[in-house]
Image (spheres, helix red, strand yellow):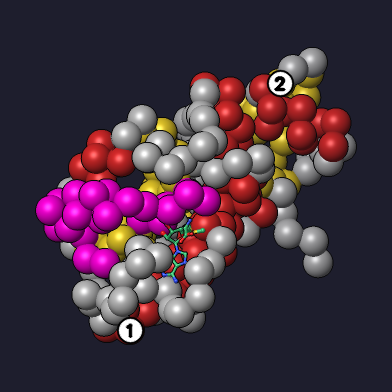
Amino acid sequence: MATTRRFFIESIEKEAVLTGDEYAHAKNVLRLKEGDEIVLLDGSGVEYDAIINRAEKGAMFCTVLNGRPSEKECKTPIALLIGALKGDKTELVVQKATELGVSRIGVFSSRFCSAYMNENKLDRLRKVAREAAKQCLRATVPQVEYYAGLGEALDSCRSFANKLFACEFAKESDVELASLAGSCALVVGSEGGFSQEEFALAKSKGFAGVTLGKRILRAETAAIVFCGVVAFALGELQ
Ligand code: SAM
């Protein structure tokens, strides 16, 4: 049986209205109509069953039936900080990290980073996160932010219990990944990698160096593997 279609909207009460992109998707792509059942999500982690009761140009009016907490969200928060990547590689990372249950994604610029970010690209990343969240049946969308410098990005994760910095020149990991417990902030560099000074900065801010093995992984591979390994260690892939 096909999964009931899911839509993120700003706020949900007894009545809810689909507008904008979500309306266009429901109307033009999925061809939904009056009487169809849908699931509405407000990003709070609750899923609401709803029925479309009226459609007009630019808006679908829905009656909300009942809500229940989603069972798809990670119990332990995981944040990913990733250096801005070239082409559409950052989008790939945002999509996969969302599927793996990450709750926050920070894209940063660093010394050897050659990609740039602007408002349009950031909007696009947020849209990718929302679409990935819908596709994998999540009830929240990871927050996606941009940090102009590595220091600022690292500071945004001050409250995390585990702060882990994937470093291509670390000989061994400072922590045992298999026995992680508590919230985790993960950092992965861009194609150009990190400088020794950047690694030292991260250490001074409480980040532990982590190796992902003897081979140098592409940045997008490293980000996806790192999220997967940590999610597994936290018991979030069961
Ligand atoms: N330009 C760098 C070089 O030539 O050594 C490689 C950078 S790598 C493509 C991009 C990022 O992926 C690194 O900054 C690091 O965060 C992560 N990474 C890749 N391979 C890794 C490994 N074996 N261990 C830890 N992190 C790794």
Q: Is residue 194 magenta?
A: yes
How crowded pointer 1 is (Cα within 10 Å; few <14, some 14-19, many 20+) is rated as: few
Rendering quarter of residue 149: top left
- Expressed as whole percent of the image width and height from the top left, the position of residue 160 reads 21, 56
Q: Residue at x 58, y 23 (%)?
A: 120
Label 2 or label 1, whichever comes before in sequence order: 2
Residue 220 makes an appearance in the image: yes
Q: CA distance from mark 2 to mark 1?
A: 49 Å
Q: Is residue 223 above or below residue 236?
A: above
Residue 236 makes an appearance in the image: no
Residue on which the image places disc 2: 59
Direction from residue 208 to residue 225 in the image, left or right = right
Report the mark closest to the observer, 2 or 1. 1
Is the shortest distance between ligand 1 and the CB of mark 1 under 8 Å?
no
Residue on which the image places disc 1: 178
Mark 2 lies on a secondary structure that is strand
Q: Quadrant of ligand 1?
A: bottom left
Q: Residue at x 19, y 49 (%)?
A: 201
- Expressed as whole percent of the image width and height from the top left, the position of residue 134 reads 62, 49
Comparing 163 with 170, the one in front is 170
Q: Amino acid at mark 2?
A: Ala
Q: Is residue 169 above or below residue 69?
A: below
Which region of the structure is painted magenta? 187-210
Mark 1 lies on a secondary structure that is helix
Q: Residue at x 69, y 27 (%)?
A: 21
Q: Amino acid at mark 1?
A: Ala
- Expressed as whole percent of the image width and height from the top left, the position of residue 144 reads 45, 39
Name the image quarter holding the N terminus.
Answer: bottom right
Direction from residue 203 to residue 230 in the image, left or right = right
